[in-house]
Amino acid sequence: MTTEPLKIGVLGYRFMGKAHANALARLPMFFPDAPDVERHTLVGRDEAALAAAADRFGFAHTETDWGAAIDEVDVFYNLGPNHVHAEPSIAALEAGVPVFCEKPLAPTLEEASAMHEAAADADVPAGCAFNYRFVPAIRYARNLIADGELGEIRQIRGRYLQDWLVDPDAPWAWRLDSELAGSGTLGDLGAHTIDLANFLVGDEVGGVDRVSGHLRTFVDERPVLDDDGDVEEYRDVTVDDAYTAQVAYDSGAMGSFEASRFAAGHKNDHTIEVHGSKGSLTFSLERLNELEVLREDSRGYETVLVTDESDPYIDHWWPPGHVIGWEHTFVHENYEFLSAVAEGDEFSPSFAEGYEVQRVLDAIERADERGEWVDVE
Ligand code: SOE
């Protein structure tokens, strides 16, 4: 019996719209056991730009009203800016439509809590697109830690460094506005790092007990450019350009995290280090096919090239050593999410896990405001 393809509605057609549309297009060839999907409706406000994107990304229909789109599709992807994550996602879940929402879950803890509750009340998958959980080397690292190869986890260190704002004349964007984004590097980049820490060592270190935080804005206004690239006006930057934070986990393990958009020379440098009583590991997104592992009694780190067919997801792609890239993480997470929808299974990371990240982000902001350690609420 052939089943009808899942009709996918997608809100947002810029960077994340392209990443997920590419992933959906590649599923049939590389993940033939994935559910059949139809790129059904692309949702946006600018009708001309929306039509061009729908054509490029292979969507059959366009819609400027996300409510109308939700009525037409089987699955709703919310890939819009952070401030539009809550309302459409909650509406879709209340209509019984599964939701896949980009990270961070929301700009504020209050909105993230409402999304978490809506997902808890719905009996359909609600996923938060923390794509770095779907890097084969990260899955390999999780397996090493779960197997006890690193022993008792003592410290986890994460930093996410970019440099697209080093130029003070780099234009204003929605990510720089607290009303639209919530926070800056903390929510945009720190969310990934906090989630990866939860994925890699959460079972071993328990929850987050308390945090410290330090947020800084280096350039407090930026030009808004018109269609000709000329400066229209200057707009305030109301979020952090960089953050640092310390985390005390229930087990006594220590976390130290930071991110920056001013780290000149670092383009998308997300690095995670884990130290245990029997060994260590280091992952760097700019070398995402590799994992540096220090095992007990060894003299130094070993570089593991995580591209064997027995390694997570690799058998869907190419022979050993034929490395994969950033975009493949979106194919993996789309495969897992849509399989969960088709089979009525749970998907991880869920809205509940996205909410746990938001609790830590909120605590780090409060710690910064107070200049002291605070408990996670
Ligand atoms: C910011 O520049 C950004 O696009 C994040 O929003 C993404 O989540 C990250 O994967 C890459 O950098």
Image: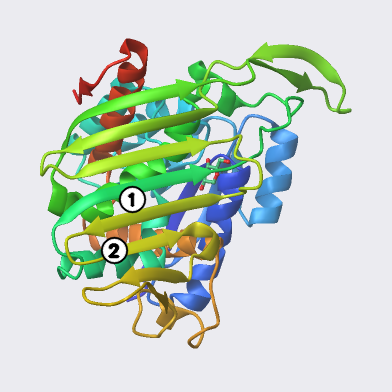
Which residue lies most toward the front here? 299
Rendering quarter of residue 5: bottom left
Could you say where residue 333 lies in the image, as x and y percent from the top left?
40, 59
Ligand 1, what quadrant?
Answer: top right
Q: Which amino acid type corresponds to the residue marked 1 in the rendered image?
A: Leu
Figure quadrant of the N terminus: bottom left
- Say the numbered circle drawn on residue 114: none
Observer-side mark, 2 or 1, equals: 2
Judged left or right of residue 239, residue 108 is left
**Is residue 143 shown above or below 225?**
below
**Is residue 214 shown above or below 35?**
above
Residue 289: in sight, yes or no?
Answer: yes
Residue, disc 1: 196
Judged left or right of residue 208, residue 130 is right
Could you say where residue 303 lies in the image, as x and y percent from the top left?
42, 75
Q: Which amino acid type corresponds to the residue marked 2 in the rendered image?
A: Ser
Residue, disc 2: 280
Which mark sits nearer the N-terminus, 2 or 1?
1
